[in-house]
Image: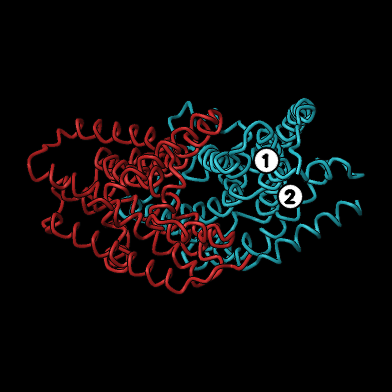
Chain colours: A cyan, B red
């Protein structure tokens, strides 16, 4: 536990050292929120509600979903890939803590940084400035946080998987872009999943991706009853464990293949 | 004249090298292509889903939105294919790679551009052209002399505006460290012009028309094609395109004149 704490702290401080670069990142998120805010505002000029969403709820959805999905562009897959590319992976493999544990600590540090410097400020500011609504209730609000926390587990395993793929290719840039764009679409980060064809939307609801945006935001807005929210979060946990097993198996296979370039 | 033909020969040689690089790393090529497509797709899926529910966006129907989106993507793909290395300025200056080009007899900017060509973008370009043609057929778009003129102008001057603006902001690297971040900001703002600008508040429309004229990349040409405007777009496009490139040229010249290497 102490080890984990130290890893988290180091990652947090590293991020903090580059806080200037982070302003640009925040600006990017703000732009994407504004685009969808205006698009939806236009849509709601001619109608009262859409699929049970009012204009205010949709604004909240945009703010929260864009903020949550802005995490997809970061993540430890870049660092992981860089280790492979530069050969540092050798050192990392020799460390007394497991590579996955090490990476998880880093991921958590990044997440707390995100929460403190982006998630909470943008969530509050966006809601106040653009006129969103608060959480449906205290229980919903707590469940929202639980769901976001669990989603980090899912996101972590996906990032590790993407990182492992970089064992086989050098184009980690393309991989990272593909990851973030795909996750945004599939999780409901671009538009709510109900806008997709019904059969597609139903499948996506139960895939792990929905757990990263749709489940927390729907819970926050009270679109799910408490019971539904709890069972969806349960599903997230199942996915998290399942992905963990799969990715670790993949890792064991791939790590044997590592050929580190000298130099 | 001899100089021009020399430059063209050099450019062809660079393209050849770029093509060979692409075929050397097939897996990377495929990943890059997919990433290009998926990146455009995420915005496209968003607007399509919204328009699909509401039946339209402003006075733009689904097919018109497709036209606008594909036109915007075509220009970006051309930039990615042939002018992508303006994004490498930051890297080249910090590593002192630019110094190498300064010692050679060919134009420095041509050498900068020649370093990177992404032929993958040509493939994605074909897909966007396909979307454009499909949407145009659905709309029964009449392509007369005027529309053909607009299309030709749009490809030439739209690219000039788009890549010119990227270049200007990347050239800021001459004066500031990490100027690339500002260029990325500009690229982020570019997201706005993929959507019908008239949906956004007047301030944003004005911004992308007068201050950062990215609206001329696809929005105004698309309006002219679809008969949504009475503005003389066929005159505005060349004016804005030439102006942006001229500005980029001035910034480049000033930057290169004041350039002293990183000293490594």
Q: Residues within 10 Å of mark 2 (few under 14, many from 20)?
A: many
Image location of residue B3, percent across then percent down: 28, 53
Residue shown at the point (68%, 56%) measured from the top left: A138
Label 1 secondary element? helix
Mark closer to the chain start, 1 or 2: 2
Subunit ID for the residue under disc 2: A
Who is closer to the viewer here, A142 or B45? B45
Q: CA distance from mark 1 to mark 2?
A: 10 Å
Label 2 secondary element? helix
- Residue picked out by circle 1: A159
Mark 1 and mark 2 on one chain: yes
- Above or below, comparing residue A175 to residue B206 in the picture: above
Residue B43, quarter of the rendered image: top left
- Above or below, comparing residue A216 to residue B197 in the picture: above
Image location of residue A216, percent across then percent down: 62, 46
Who is closer to the viewer here, B227 or B7? B7
Q: Is residue B91 left or right of residue B258?
A: right
Q: Is residue A2 left or right of residue B71?
A: right
Q: Residues within 10 Å of mark 1 (few under 14, many from 20)?
A: many
Whether residue A162 can be seen here: yes
Residue shown at the point (48%, 42%) measured from the top left: A192
Q: Could you tell me if the residues under marks 1 and 2 are in contact, i.e. CB atoms within 8 Å?
A: yes
Subunit ID for the residue under disc 1: A
The dot on residue A107 is 2
Who is closer to the viewer here, A208 or A104? A104
Residue at the left extreme of this rendering:
B145
Whether residue A150 can be seen here: no
Image location of residue A177, percent across then percent down: 54, 43
């Amino acid at each position: 536990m102490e080890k984990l704490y130290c890893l988290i702290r180091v990652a947090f401080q590293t991020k903090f050292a580059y806080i200037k670069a982070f302003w640009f990142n925040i600006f990017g998120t703000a732009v994407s929120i504004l685009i969808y805010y205006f698009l939806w505002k236009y849509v709601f000029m001619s109608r009262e509600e859409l699929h049970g969403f009012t204009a205010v709820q949709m604004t909240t959805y945009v703010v929260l979903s864009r903020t949550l999905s802005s995490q997809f562009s970061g993540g430890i897959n870049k660092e992981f890939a860089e280790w492979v590319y530069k050969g540092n992976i050798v050192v990392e493999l020799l460390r007394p803590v497991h590579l996955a544990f090490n990476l998880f600590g880093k991921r958590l540090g990044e997440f707390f940084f995100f929460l403190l410097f982006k998630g909470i400020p943008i969530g509050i500011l966006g809601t106040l400035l653009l006129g969103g609504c608060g959480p449906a209730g205290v229980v919903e609000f707590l469940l929202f946080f639980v769901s976001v926390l669990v989603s980090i587990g899912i996101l972590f395993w996906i990032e590790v998987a993407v990182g492992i793929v970089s064992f086989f290719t050098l184009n980690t840039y393309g991989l990272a872009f593909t990851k973030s764009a795909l996750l945004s679409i599939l999780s409901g980060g671009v538009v709510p999943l109900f806008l997709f064809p019904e059969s597609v939307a139903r499948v996506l609801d139960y895939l792990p991706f929905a757990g990263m945006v749709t489940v927390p935001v729907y819970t926050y807005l009270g679109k799910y009853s408490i019971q539904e929210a709890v069972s969806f979060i349960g599903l997230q946990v199942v996915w998290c464990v399942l992905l963990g097993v799969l990715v670790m198996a993949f890792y064991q296979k791939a790590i044997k293949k590592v050929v580190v370039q000298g130099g | 004249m001899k100089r021009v033909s020399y430059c063209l020969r050099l450019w062809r040689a660079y393209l050849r090298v770029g093509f060979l690089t692409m075929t050397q790393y097939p897996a990377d090529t495929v990943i890059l292509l997919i990433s290009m497509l998926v990146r455009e797709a995420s915005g496209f899926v968003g607007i399509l889903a919204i328009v699909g529910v509401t039946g339209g966006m402003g006075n733009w129907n689904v097919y018109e939105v497709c036209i606008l989106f594909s036109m915007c993507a075509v220009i970006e793909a051309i930039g990615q294919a042939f002018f992508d290395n303006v994004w490498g300025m930051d890297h080249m200056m910090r590593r002192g790679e630019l110094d190498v080009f300064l010692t050679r007899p060919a134009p420095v900017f041509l050498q900068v551009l020649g370093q990177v060509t992404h032929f993958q973008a040509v493939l994605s370009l074909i897909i966007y052209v396909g979307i454009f043609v499909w949407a145009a057929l659905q709309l029964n778009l009449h392509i007369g002399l005027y529309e053909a003129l607009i299309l030709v102008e749009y490809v030439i001057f739209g690219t000039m505006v788009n890549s010119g603006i990227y270049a200007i902001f990347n050239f800021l690297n001459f004066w500031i460290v990490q100027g690339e971040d500002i260029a990325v900001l500009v690229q982020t703002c570019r997201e706005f012009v993929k959507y019908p600008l008239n949906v956004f508040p007047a301030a944003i429309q004005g911004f992308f028309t007068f201050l950062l004229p990215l609206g001329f990349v696809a929005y105004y040409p698309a309006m002219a094609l679809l008969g949504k405007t009475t503005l003389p777009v066929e005159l505005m496009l060349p004016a804005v395109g030439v102006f942006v490139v001229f500005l980029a040229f001035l910034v480049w010249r000033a930057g290169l004149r004041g350039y002293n290497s990183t000293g490594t």
